[in-house]
Amino acid sequence: MSKTRASGRTVGGLRSLSLQAPAVTLLLLWMLVPLGMTVWFSLQRYNLLMPGMEGFAGLENYEFLFTDPALWRAMGNTLLLVGSVLVITVVGGVLLAVLFQQEFPGRGIARVLAISPFFVMPTVSALVWKNMMMHPSNGVLAWLAGVFGLPAVDWFSALPLTSIIIIVAWQWLPFALLILLTAMQSLDEDQVEAARMDGAGPLSIFFYITLPHLKRAISVVIMIEMIFLLTIFAEIYVTTSGGPGLATTNLAFLIYIQALLDFDVGLASAGGVVAIILANIVAIFLVRLVARNLEH
C-alpha cells in the first residue's frame, strides 16, 4: 500500500509539472530572451548611422558609457527625482490619510477627488501642467504670482528638475494616499480612545500610535513607487525633452537619446544593462526592508 501511495504521489507530481511546464517555459522565454538580447547588443559595435561597421566590441560600450559625464549626470538626476518624489508622496500621503480619516461633511467626495489624479495618464498630466499650470504667460501659477504682485516664473527654464518633481509627485501622491488610507482603516480606535483618556495629545497619538501602525504600508508604498519612478520618461519627454542641456535627463531618457536620437544600439543596450543592475540593487534593498518590517 505504501508503494501505491508513493507511486500515486509521483504520478501526481509529474502530471502537475507537465501542466505547469508550458506556462513556466513561456514566462522564462518572455523574460530571458529580451534580457539576453540586450546583453548581447551591449557587447556589439552597432550604430545604425554606420552600416557595415558592426562587430564585437567587448566592453568598449561600457568603457565609453562610464567615462561619459552624461551618465553620472543622468544617474544623479534619477536619484534626486526618485528621492524627492518619495519624500513628498510619503509625508504628504501620511498627513492626508490622517486628515481623510477624520469625519467631516463631504468626506467621500473629497477622497475621490484626492485619489483621482493617479488615474490620469502621464502624458496628459504633463501637458496639463505644462500648458495650464506652469505656463509663464497663461498658467494658473503665473496668474497667482500676478495677484500677489510677483513676477511669473518660467518653470521649465528656471527650475526644470523641480518642475518634473512637482508633476510626478502630483501623480503619485494619490497612490500613497490610497494605500495609507486603506491601512488607516485597520487602526484600533479603542487604542486611540484609551490614549486620549490617558491624556495623550494629537501629536503623541500620531507619533506613537498612528505612525507605527502605518510602518508596513509606508514600506510597501516606497517599494512600489521606487520601482516605477526609476523609469520615469513621459513627463520628461513631453515637458523638457531632457533639457535644458542635461538638467532633467534621467537614466531612462538617456537610453532613449542613445537609441532613438543617436541610433547607437550598442551604447543604448549598455545603458539598459546598467539600468537593470541599478533596478535590481534597489529591488533587493527594498525587499529586505519590507520583509524586515513584516517580521515586526
Image (cartoon, grey):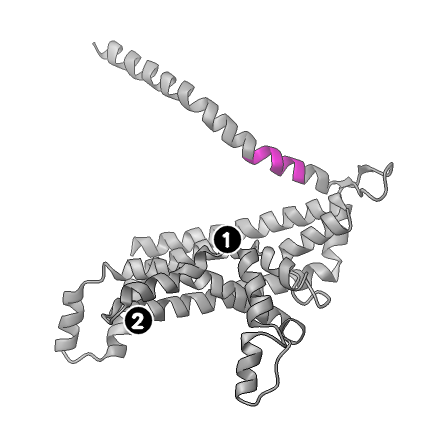
Where residue 179 appears, as percent x and y from the top left, is 35, 57
Which is nearer the N-term, disc 2 or disc 1?
2
Residue under the point 47% across and 54% down: 285
Q: Nearer the viewer, residue 288 or 271?
A: 271
Q: Nearer the viewer, residue 290 or 119?
A: 119
Residue under the point 42% across and 24% down: 20
Cα–Cα gap, marks 2 and 1? 27 Å
Q: Residue 99, labelled with which disc?
A: 2
Relative to 206, 157 lies left or right: right
Name the amino acid, label 2.
Answer: Leu
Q: Quadrant of the C terminus?
A: bottom left
Where residue 262 appears, as percent x and y from the top left, is 78, 51
Q: Nearer the viewer, mark 2 or mark 1?
A: 2
Relative to 87, 4 lies left or right: left
- Magenta segment: 31-38
Residue under the point 68% across and 62% down: 242
Q: Nearer the viewer, residue 245 or 9?
A: 245
Q: Residue 227, labelled with which disc?
A: 1
